[in-house]
Image: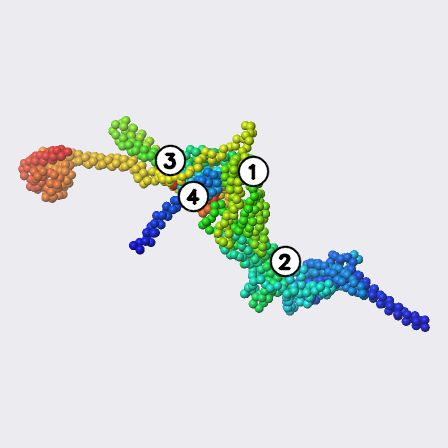
Amino acid sequence: MKALAPLAVLCGLWFAAPCAHAQNDEAAFAEAASALQSGGFSVAIERLEQLSDRGLVRPNISLNRAIAYLQRAESAKRKPGDLGQAVAALRETLLLDPDNEAAQHALAEVTLEISRQRARKGLDPVVIEPPLSYALFDLLPVNVWAWTTLFASVVCSAGLLLARSELRPRRLAGQIAAVSGLLLLLVGAGFSWAADDQRRTQRPAVVVVPEADLLDASGSRQTAKALGVDTTSIPEGASVVITRSNGRLLEVGWGSFRAWLQSSQVRVLASP
Amino acid sequence: MILLLGARAFVRLNAALLGVGSTLLATAAWSQTTVDLDVAATTVEVGQPFAVQMQALTSEGTPDSPRLKVPTDFEIQGPNVGSNHQVSFVNGRLLRRSGINATWQLIGKRAGVFTLGPASVNTEQGKAQSRSLSIKVVAAGSLPRPKRRGGFPFDDDDLFGGLGGFGGRRRSLLDEMFGRGEEEAPPAPPPEFSLDVAPDPRAFVRAVVQPENAVVGQQVTLDIYAYGSQGRFRENNPHEPRRSDFYSYSLIENSAREPTYVVKIGDTDFYATRIRRYALFPLKAGELEIGPMELNLYGSGYATRQSPDGLLRRTKALTVHVTEPDLKDRPLGYQVGDVGDYKLEANVAPRTLTEGDSLSVSATLEGLGNLPGQLLTPEQKGTTWLTPTVKGEAKQISEGVIGGTRTFTYVVKLERAGEIDLGALLLPHYNPKTGQYVTARAELGKVQVSAKAQTSQAEVETPRPPLAAALIPATQLGPPVARKEGLPSRPWFWWLALGSPALVVAAAGLQHGGSRVLSRLRAERASLKRQSSEALSEAKSLHAKGEPKSAYSAIERALYLAIEAHTAVRGRGMLQPELAAALAKAQVDETLRSDIVTLFAELDQARFAPAAGAAAELLQRAERALGRLNQKAKAKA
């Protein structure tokens, strides 16, 4: 029995540790929420970032973080990039809770405010959206593409069977169904694979500095001429897609081209 | 007589005149400007610096503009000019004279005998000059080294260094009267100057940093010492140490006013002085490097022909291991770099005001360390803290310690009425002595804010609603969001999506292929029947023609073809028992099988020994057998 005691203690610790951790998380969140209520955004930001650093992904954490950054952005303690952080937090909220209308509305307001502030400085207010391919594959949920593929497969199979009929009308119908189904199958399968691959390998992110300079793979700044565009930086709040990482540099897709950024200048959106 | 008397009188007169004259001359001499020129040694080496001193005294005014005539074969620096006063009793009278001492540093560039001077000054009476001097310059290294003696506290004007023989600064009568200018023994060296071994017997410099392990923002002190065994020296051509990873305060900028000590290292006495002291505050974590300091040690014992600027010496680069303070127990709002020991006090005025007005908060931060530049202000709805005015700099407040006082003046706007507790100003910081975090705190107390009088609609400016107005903070952490795997991530998806049509195509292909094979088989079988029938017709024809042997062959051929067509047995070449077995296997009944085998046997026999009328019988029997085979095949189909 005595020999079992240490083992029992170890087992207890093993099971108690996650419970203690969870209680700490709850306490930290509660402290942040309470601070937010009274306008203590600094405390809220610190606690919520600690929770994010621990890998905790909850839509409520992202939502409260967005509120905290927005409060700071509108205070005398504002720091460059606060609005970008708020955009990142709101986008994260919508990734985890797509039906949150308040977050959608706030995101639109914040994006507009960024554009307004940039316009006041004489900078381009337009915020370019994610790459075309990303937007295309993200047009519908990946399962919609998957079900389309399965449906096309059934239609194609049925068409092929029907095409062997001896009756001409049935044979004709079968041929049409087979061809249509095959085309739809190719498109659906392609989109399904691309959307799934995109989900697995590419991570959405948001620029959280006023201007993120566009770099090449070695970290040197690129000229607009080399990029073939009118700008040499990505503005705050812009959505990008991370395709590769190389030490402290990240390759991102923005609009129709790709470039490298400092990893400290973007915030990767958390996903479950 | 008169002549004699005249002569004696002349002599007496002359003596008297001489006496008066000499008195007058002596007095006059004291009244005039005197310029003396002297040199420490009359023989020097090429490249060896030596000093030439001029003393100019006058009773009226003060001489100025000292000049020295020097051949082009010498490099000249200076003069360093000092004042001089003399009081003398001449012929019962107290005479005061004032003047200047001017010292030049010369270096001979080639060997030879040269004339230096005269030196001259300007006075109220006009220009006065000294005599000239002769000096011999010999080849470098040809003179024996003079003994160095200890001596005076370091003096920038003392360019004689340890040269023997010159005797140091010329002492005036007042110096002799009051005992000034005598040689003073150097003070005992502090312990930090001590060394067990000298890295260089002539001269070296040493850099020391303390502590070697620090946290970001903690003061580390860099001291640089110079040691020379060839007499006194001064620094020349200094290159400061690189310290870009630190915020630095220069506590000793140059060694001119620093004391020189005599430090015994082994058997050698070294003159030593602290030439630099910096208070450094690391700006980041890591292994931070302090670059070497480089300078020339300059003096008569250090400058040579090869290095006229003196001996070049360099310290080693140093590394300070810097970390961030421990994360454990780190208070909220702590800024990395806020290290020290601080106190915070604050005053608030006024404490009664109207909604929308502002008040002033003046905070005083005092303590040791590189004073932080910002404080944590309270955050609450309805109060806006504007950027403060900051005054006061950190400085050296005691030996090698940086600290001081800094004031922060805030304007705080209050936008809600009622009794408002302003909270507290905070400065979380790390105390390296205790190794703990401390939060300096200044309570601000409460203020009374009266409501603003209602204004007209026109005066009210509706501000833009806050960006977060539509968002309500969540109060619960909430459950985790399950990760949704897409269908394409499931392996069965691709098998199903692409496999179904492929399966249909494959099945159709198999079916088509099978049909073709069957058709081909059928066609082949139909062909054998036809051939069998033809062979039988041929046998009849041959029989009719009276060719029984050919007829037997034809019958045999017809039988074989029919057997193959109906049973797929290729009987040609088989022995009769084998044929019987094959037919049995093909489910041909025993009677038919026996008839067929017997027919083949009789056909063989008949071919070699044909009997009369046998052909017709055999033909009939073959026809019957063929018919039964055909019937059997139809029944089977």
Q: Is residue A50 visible?
A: yes
- Under circle 2, the secondary element is helix
Residue A188: where, in percent of width, then height?
35, 35
The answer to whether the residue labelled 3 contacts the one labelled 4, judged by CB atoms less than 8 Å apart, is no
Residue of label 3:
A141
Q: In screen coordinates, is B206 left or right of A64?
A: right
Q: In this view, does A182 lie to the left or right of B61?
A: left
In the rendered image, which residue does mark 1 sit on?
B352
Q: Mark 4 points at which residue?
A: A28
Residue at the extreme right of the image, as rendered: B1
Task: Examine the rendering and report whether any part of residue A259 can be seen.
Answer: no
Tell which tag, 1 or 2, sits nearer the viewer: 1
Mark 2–mark 4 distance (CA, rounded to whole Å): 58 Å
Q: Which disc, if any, is residue B257?
A: 2
Along the viewing direction, whichever of B336 and A145 lies nearer the viewer: B336
Q: Mark 3 lies on which chain?
A: A
Q: How crowded is mark 2: few (under 14 residues within 10 Å), some or many (20 or more)?
A: some
Name the quarter where the C terminus of chain B is drawn.
top left
Residue at (66%, 60%) from the top-left corner? B155
Measured Cα–Cα span from mark 1 to mark 3: 60 Å
Q: Amino acid type of disc 3?
A: Pro
Q: Mark 1 near mark 2, Cβ–Cβ under 8 Å?
A: no
Q: Which amino acid does label 2 sit on?
A: Arg
